[in-house]
Image (cartoon, helix red, strand yellow):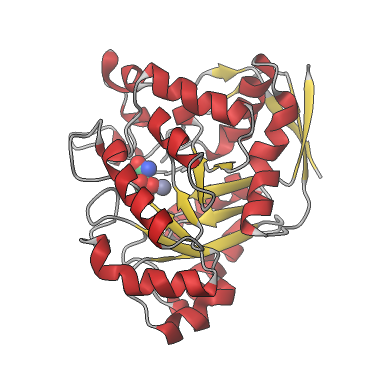
Amino acid sequence: MDQLTLNTPLDMHLHLRDGDMLELVAPLSAETFSGAVIMPNLVPPVDSLDAVHGYRGRILQAIGKNAFAPFMTLFFRQYSEAELLAAKDHIIGIKLYPAGATTNSEAGVKAIDSVEPTIRLMEEMGMPLLIHGETHGFVMDRETEFLATYRHLATKFPKLNITMEHITTAAAVELLDEFENLRATVTLQHLLITLDDVAGGMLNPHLFCKPIAKRPEDRDALLDAALKAHPRLMFGSDSAPHPREKKECCGCAAGVFTAPIALQVLADLFTKNGCQQNLQAFVSDNARRLYDVTPAEKVVTLVREPFEVPAIYGETVVPMYAGETIPWSVQSVE
Ligand code: NCD
Ligand code: ZN
């Protein structure tokens, strides 16, 4: 298997940032992906329709001539019915962060119970709820502890579509099978690495992200679900660029930058495991069906030819596998 064609690849969890960083990273996603779910954790957060419009305009500017659909999200707060109705046709969903769980989430939710009125309205309007599912417990247990909240929401709001963002545990994969209204994204790094790769030897800040990579058995369960293209699992890179000085320092920011290598590495991973026939569903079809989106078609051909990953992009952002050679590259995009 030396060549692979993907139709309309989608990244269902992406951080594009703003300003110079947006200008640098947006084209790197827009070259190969047909669209992406854009995270709203800017400073200040994207939490009004005006902010959505403004940010979307800056993204379209930054991607230049590339055909790329930015699926916008609002940052979760308590919204009125009128606000939600006005926003409905301009967003793909609302992203809920527990306060302080990750980068730029200070304005997030302190107690989920207290925001159920907004969640109820979202359910009635058929508006998806995207969740960063971590508690404030022990770092390795935060996601499993949060599963009770997913369970509660999935039961109490049976018509609400809930996306468990960037799942990292075998337990989350199991929960996905229990509730029809749960779906999930998984990142590139969580299909590949464990905590050992982050902190088992010399500390690798470029693999440090939230949720932190877990145990080998968790990674294996995630990989297994992705390789078989679990019908409610989607690729969401969670590509989260930070300037090098915010990663290689004391107090490293959380986030792994994978956008420019994601499809190449997925091609390698799926072919290596003999599951190339399932990559299309994982990286596009599942998302199109679950979110009912029809982005412009883009055909990406990948080949088994070495790609030297740049050591740094724009003298600012260090990608995963910086300076290494990966076995697959993008041959053409039409
Ligand atoms: C993300 C970021 O940097 O915005 N960081 C991360 O480690 N994944 C936020 C997030 O998705 O948690
Ligand atoms: Zn993220």
Of 245 and 31, nearer the camera is: 31
Counting from the top left corner in percent of width and height, residue 106 is at 23, 59
Q: Quadrant of the C terminus?
A: top right
Please name the residue shown 64% across and 33% down the image: 229
Of 169 and 302, nearer the camera is: 169
One can see residue 310 in this view: yes
In the rendered view, tell whether residue 234 sits above or below residue 131: above
In the rendered view, tell whether residue 145 sits above or below residue 113: above
Please name the residue shown 60% across and 64% down the image: 60
Horizontally, residue 223 falls left or right of residue 278, namely left
Q: Quadrant of the N terminus?
A: top right
Horizontally, residue 270 falls left or right of residue 141, namely right
Of 79 and 297, nearer the camera is: 79
Please name the residue shown 75% across and 28% down the image: 277
In the rendered view, tell whether residue 103 sits above or below residue 85: above
One can see residue 192 in this view: no
Counting from the top left corner in percent of width and height, residue 81 is at 42, 83
Please name the residue shown 47% across and 20% down the image: 220
On the image, which quarter does residue 110 sit in? bottom left
Horizontally, residue 82 falls left or right of residue 35, namely left
